[in-house]
Amino acid sequence: MPALTPDDVHTATETLSRLTEYLRDTPDPGEALALVEPLLDEYAGIPIQLGDTLRALARTVLDHPDTPRTPDLHVLVAKLRTAAWEQTDQHTLHYALDNLRALLTSASPNTPEYCWCR
């Protein structure tokens, strides 16, 4: 794998910023859902990736021979690992997307609306 640079990661965060701005312009809900779905994929979405990234950072810092072994280090590594679990727990957001998709499908213009007058 080619080495990553901070610019590569910055590009990814810029893409997320562009998506946010696009969603603020109120696009079609189906299109918006399609754009957000990959972010919340239960296996490879942002919650899982961010959790894995935080755990990998903690391991990298802890395992590096030049890292000073201090009580502060262990506190900071514990914070990274806790944050990683908290992020990973958000993987269930894909269920919200499933429910939203079902709601949008049932509210499709082709589906007649319920009316008391019928």
Image (cartoon, rainbow, N blue to C red):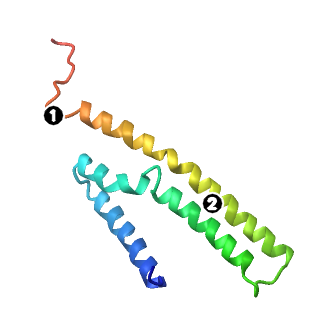
Discs 1/2, front: 2
SS under mark 1: loop
Alpha-carbon span between mark 1 and mark 2: 41 Å
Which residue, given by chain and number where applicable, does mark 1 sit on?
Answer: 109
On-image quarter of the C terminus: top left
Q: Is residue 115 above or below residue 110?
A: above
Residue 16: mark:
none
Q: Residue at x 85, y 78 (%)?
A: 70
Q: Which mark is residue 84?
A: 2
Relative side of 22 to 75, left or right: left
Name the residue type under label 1: Pro
In the rendered view, does 104 fall on the left or right side of 55? left
Q: Nearer the viewer, residue 18 or 51?
A: 51
Q: Is residue 76 above or below residue 46?
A: below
Residue extending furthest toward the bottom:
66
| Quarter of the rendering containing residue 15 | bottom left
Please say if 98 is above or below 51.
above
